[in-house]
Amino acid sequence: MKIINYFYHHSNLVTKEKLLLTLALTNSTISQQELNKLLADFEIEDEQLEVILLFAFLQKKQPHLIFPQEITAQLQGVIRYFQYKNTGLLAAFRKIGSELNKEKIGVLLMKGVVMKFLRPEEQRHMYDIDFAVLPKDYDKAVEIARALDFKVSYIAEHSTDFFWNDHGIDIHRFLTKLGRDTSATDQFVWDRAQKVSAFGVDAFLPVTEDIIFMILINAYGNIVAQESSPNRFFWIIDTAFLIREYPNLDWNIVLDNAQKTDQLYKIKIMLSVFDKIIPLQIPENLISSISIIEKAERKHKNEIFTYSLKEIKKKRNEIWESPKRNFTDVINAFKARIVYRSLKMVKVFSLLNFLFLDSALNWVLSTQAQESK
């Protein structure tokens, strides 16, 4: 339960956001008076992009609600901005995608562009566009992108990130960011995918179950690593949409993907967090049916513990570097230093004493949960 609470708190959802998610993604309704309370402190400059989109979803879903004219105009302005940005991204996708089509290189849609394809009528903010090619075609695809004047911004084991006229395009070799070759299991996703024409490119669309698997694994990694992202709860929106629109999901495909890639623990955690945020959407007994072997559980707990240590170190450094630190801050920095060094010793010692790892991790998670309240 502490692990689930850790992920829930690190999703950084405040009360208003959780309410908006529930209203936008379920059949729940809201009164005009309740809406007025939500909008009482609404300032377009202070709201995050995801929250603005949720208000736009709510306005469309419950047209009987009356939004102030000024806020309606602001929401429409942001939507037009998304349309403009997405138009540029899709133009970049067509440019590289059409060339890959000419070279008979398969293009598999991933992440945000998948949801944009499935929900063309909805405004889906995309920071960039991700797609995969088969590993045998990866180097050639990267060469083609370079030849088209796409500029490399980052190279990882699983992908190469490009920019073209400030529009991000990520070409993936592997479908999940696991730090290892997953081509053997990725092939099952390619085999199940269907051919589609997407935004002027002949592409492959993964089946819904494979899309959900990739969404959950990506979200797990973002939360554990505490990566800053303007799309921090789009994974919730996307998962809820897919579950609602495709009621006959074969969850065995999701679990089989997880089993083959040693990611069952991550899938169980993320489904549990989703269920905590948006209850009663996941089939009953699905989560409890997922059994995890002890070795796999310990491996993932160790990963969480490692990132928790990084958070403690980061907090300590922030205190030390603050020009306005006072005596209390210095004391807290010393405490953080002691905790960090002690837990680093625990991490080394835990290789010999597994129980010690559980005790230390539980302490860290309890402490962070208290700080999040």
Image (tube, rainbow, N blue to C red):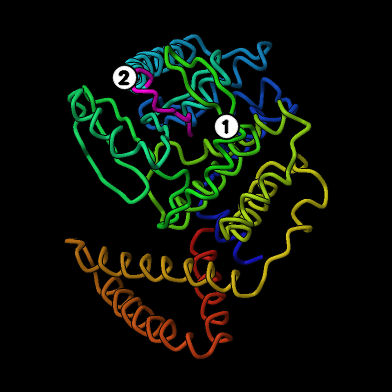
In the image, which is nearer the foreground, mark 1 or mark 2? 2
Q: Secondary structure at mark 1?
A: loop
Residue 199: image location, x then y, percent: 44, 14
Q: Is residue 101 left or right of residue 213?
A: left
Give the residue at mark 1.
Answer: 206
Residue at left offset 34%, top offset 38%: 138
Residue 104 within the magenta-colored segment of the rendering: yes
Residue 294: image location, x then y, percent: 64, 74
Image quadrant of residue 36? top right
Question: Going by the picture, which residue comes out furthest to the right?
Answer: 284
Q: Is residue 74 visible?
A: no
Gap between marks 1 and 2 measured at Cα? 21 Å
What is the crowding at mark 1: few (fewer than 14 residues within 10 Å), some, or many (at least 20)? many
* The one of 203 and 36 positioned closer to us in this rendering: 203
Give the residue at mark 2.
Answer: 99
Q: Secondary structure at mark 2?
A: helix
Q: Which mark is residue 236?
A: none
Residue at left offset 29%, top offset 74%: 333
Q: Is residue 321 left or right of residue 364?
A: left
Q: Which residues are magenta?
A: 101-111
Q: Earlier in the sequence, mark 1 or mark 2?
A: 2
Residue 287: image location, x then y, percent: 74, 54
Q: Is residue 62 left or right of residue 196?
A: right
Quadrant in which the N terminus is drawn: bottom right
